Image (spheres, rainbow, N blue to C red):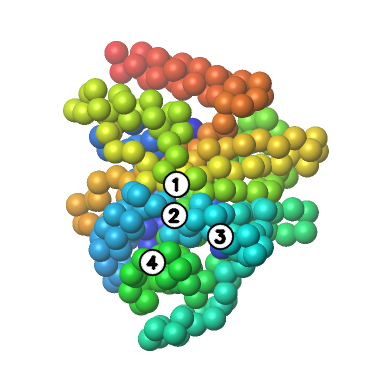
Amino acid sequence: MGQTTSSPTHTANSSSSASCPVDHSAFAKHPPTPLTVPPSCPVDHTSIETRVRSSTAASGCPVDHASFSKSSSSEALDPRNHLPVLTQERVPTQTIDLPTERTASSIPRDAAGNWEYPSPQQFYNALVRKGWETPEGEIETMVQIHNFLNEKAWEEVHKWETQVNKDEKFQLVSLKGRPGELSPKARFWLVVGWLLPDRFNNEPPFDRHDWIVRRPSTGEQVRYVIDYYGAPPLPDGSPVFSLDVRPALDSFGSISMRIRAATRTAWENVAQDARHG
């Protein structure tokens, strides 16, 4: 279950405090529903997307959860997102001021409130810490894209969860970035893409996240896997991303959800073929 969509400043398909909570459902050369930037936007998204994809192809989300989790043992990590506290201090080499205000997401963290996104200054500090060279003037746009992808990923999780209980007020209790670790599904489709490159996408996801969702009414926790894919830009140069969001196959309930979704999709395809036959 996934989708591709467009942000006020970018595109993504459906995958917190300083965290990056990005359908590859058809796995064709071009993903199903693209997330794109309006052509009137003055920001050069193509150049940003090129840098993001070239870097994330090897390293994942700009907020590098994996490398942070390997930080010095003296540095306390938040177990909810495996990140240290990201400073709001200006980098010594920084030439412009970046906003330090943080935006609240629509993603519930617990009964007390929602996750917050990193401020542009925190986001920039994370990039600098990782060694990425990113124009400071583009940071605010990158944060908007980052937040947009989070929201779209949560929408996909919401679609899955409401199949179980549409009235449940489920929460994202923790998340972890796993760049460089291919999920079994991503690995399968990568092999298919290598074997049939004319029919299927043969690019690996540029990032992967695991989200743990809690159902407060029962206390059950469900792990979701999010694979983030890049896609060919639109003719106007607007970048496109694709998200594959689904419950991990590590419990009977999640397996049942995946089987029901696959069965429903198969019947919908049969019905569509019959209408056009």
What numbered label is drawn on residue 147?
none
Indicate the position of residue 189 as horizontal and vertical percent values.
35, 28
Q: Check if mark 3's residue and mark 2's residue have beta carbons within 8 Å.
A: no
Q: Earlier in the sequence, mark 3 or mark 2?
A: 2
Q: Secondary structure at mark 4?
A: loop
Mark 4 → mark 3, Cα distance in angstroms: 15 Å
Disc nearest the viewer among 1 and 3: 3
Label 1 element class: loop
Disc 2 marks a residue whose amino acid type is: Cys
Q: Are marks 1 and 2 in contact (CB under 8 Å)?
A: yes
In which quarter of the view is residue 238 placed? Answer: bottom left
1 or 3: tag closer to the N-terminus: 3
- Of the residues shown, which amino acid type is indicated by label 4? Gly
In this rendering, does residue 39 appear at all?
no
Q: Which residue is mark 3?
A: 71
162, above or below 150, in the image: above
Kind of residue at disc 1: Pro
Give the label on residue 131, or none.
4
Residue that badge 1 annotates: 179
Query: Which marked residue is nearer to the observer: mark 3 or mark 2?
Result: 3
Q: Position of residue 188 (x, y in %)?
A: 38, 25
Q: Nearer the viewer, mark 4 or mark 1?
A: 4
Mark 1 Cα-neighbour bin, 10 Å: few <14, some 14–19, many ≥20: many
Q: Earlier in the sequence, mark 4 or mark 1?
A: 4
The residue lying furthest to the front in this view is: 73
Q: Earlier in the sequence, mark 4 or mark 2?
A: 2
Dot 3 lies on which element? loop
Residue at the location (49% across, 82% down)?
90
Query: What is the CA distance from the residue labelled 1 to the residue labelled 2?
Result: 7 Å
Query: Residue 61 shows which numbered tag?
Result: 2
